[in-house]
Amino acid sequence: MKNILLAGVLAVCIAPSAQAQKFMTRTGKITFDATTKTSPEKISGKNNEVASILDGSNGQLVFQVLVKNFKFEKQLMEEHFNENYMESDKFPKSDFKGNISAPGDVNYGKDGTYNVTVSGKLTIHGVTKDVQVPGSVVVEGSKVKLAAKFAVKLADYNVTIPSLVADKVAKECSIILDAELMKK
Amino acid sequence: MMMNIRKAVVLSLSLLASAGTFAQDNLMAELENGAPKQKDYAFATFKSTRLIDGSSVECLGTGVLDFRISHRFGDISQGLDNFFGVDVAYTKLNLDYGINRWLTVGIGHTGLNKEDDGFVKIKLLRQETKGGMPITLTYFGSAAIETLPAPTLPDSTQKWLFSNRLFFTNQLLIARKFNDRISLQLMPTVVHYNLVDSSKYSNNTFALGIGGRVKLTKRSAITAEYYYRLNNTSFTVNGLPTYNTFSLGYEIETGGHVFQIMVTNAQGLTERMFIAQTTDSWSKQQLHLGFNVSRVFTIIKPESYKDDKDDKKW
């Protein structure tokens, strides 16, 4: 009896790791855009070194970016982004920790597009906020493509826009995420 | 019994929840452990490629063109006679271009002595933020040609040689960004004058410059720059003694502009003038107001933006 119990406990403990299907990338893409109608130029940056892991067994999902890896068309804008807005020496990373709200909806064994909602904690500029973001999970063989588009209010993350350029930078910037994760 | 089951359910749920966040932390740790090591370099040691009169360690980005207008007004101590110097202004125009991250070249013209100059700036070392290289090191080299009409020589058989008009400057710019606010720079300098007034002078003037900035806000800073001559301190210009140059500035950036205003005893805007041929002095309050305005243009887009066509232009 004892042995069976022990076996059962062990099975429960080991089962998740045995089932675990983890998907990972270090080359995901995030583009942000804070251009408004009154902006004299496009205010947008790209990061092509987004790291992410998705645990298919429970829908848990993390993202991490180095702020300095955002590249801009204008070098000066990149400098201002790092120095004045994101203060990337003080806050070098932005990340997200969360999970797919209904992890059971996605079948990683079957190719297809699954629309999901992801909720969790988004940390930007040292400020952590609870967010809920709609997105899609596309399963293609051993690849999982994640895509999402959402808006972030700069003020929520204590990113201040100086009054001088207040009408040239959007108060709310759009973030587009595009990542192709491979089975680990 | 019911209570116990409820308790057990609540307990196991909260355990599950905490296990959930742990798992995410584990995932994050997994990401971070395997992350490739990336060197992190100090950036924006100074806001501009010029400290005040002289150069800073900063180079332009790849494909960036910088158009600069510098003004130095006349001697403020003459009061209303020249409207505190505003009536007599010298201008320098510069076009600088970043060939790549570590190589910037530029050309300029200034009205004082009708001088044209060209320079090359090479970033040799970059300061790292987590140990490693403690400084940024940039080489600056320039050549300048005075284009005033040749002076009348006492002996008419003598010729005014073209080489008499040439000046060469070599500098090592050594800077360290100590924190968000404070950056300091040392500038060992040698200025070569092809022709000096007297054989008692060396053709090479050695000087040590020191400068720095303290940021007041994210977008403005107080700057200072001093060049101490190690020889040729008895240089004269048109019979006037010369002094070391000290400049005090305030700079503010707005979008694509950096605007610098300064008070300085130097009116010259090329190295050979402001390092060893400054005839005004702080002790006599012979000061000059001035400003530098810089506007940058991106000529060649970075690789990852080459395909974009929809961008708004000025």
Image (spheres, coloured by chain):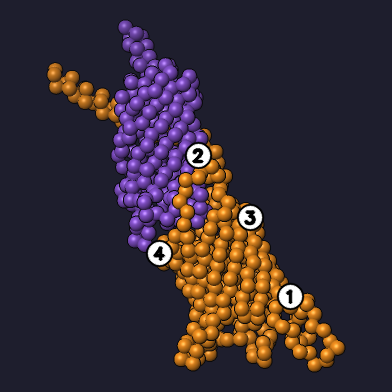
Chain colours: A purple, B orange
Mark linked to residue A48: 2
Give me the chain letter of mark 1. B
Tell me which corner region of the image, top left, top right, bottom left or bottom right, holds residue B89: bottom right
Tell me which corner region of the image, top left, top right, bottom left or bottom right, holds residue B275: bottom right
Indicate which label's residue lies in the foreground, 4 or 1.
1
Indicate which label's residue lies in the foreground, 4 or 2.
2
Q: CA distance from mark 4 to mark 2?
A: 31 Å
Q: CA distance from mark 2 to mark 1?
A: 49 Å
Residue bearing mark 4: B217
Give me the chain letter of mark 4. B
Q: Residues within 10 Å of mark 3 (few under 14, many from 20)?
A: some
- In what element is the residue under mark 2? strand
Which residue is drawn at the image coordinates 74% and 78% (left, top)?
Answer: B165
Q: Earlier in the sequence, mark 3 or mark 1?
A: 3
Q: CA distance from mark 3 to mark 4?
A: 31 Å
Q: Earlier in the sequence, mark 4 or mark 1?
A: 1
The answer to whether residue B235 is above or below residue A66 is below
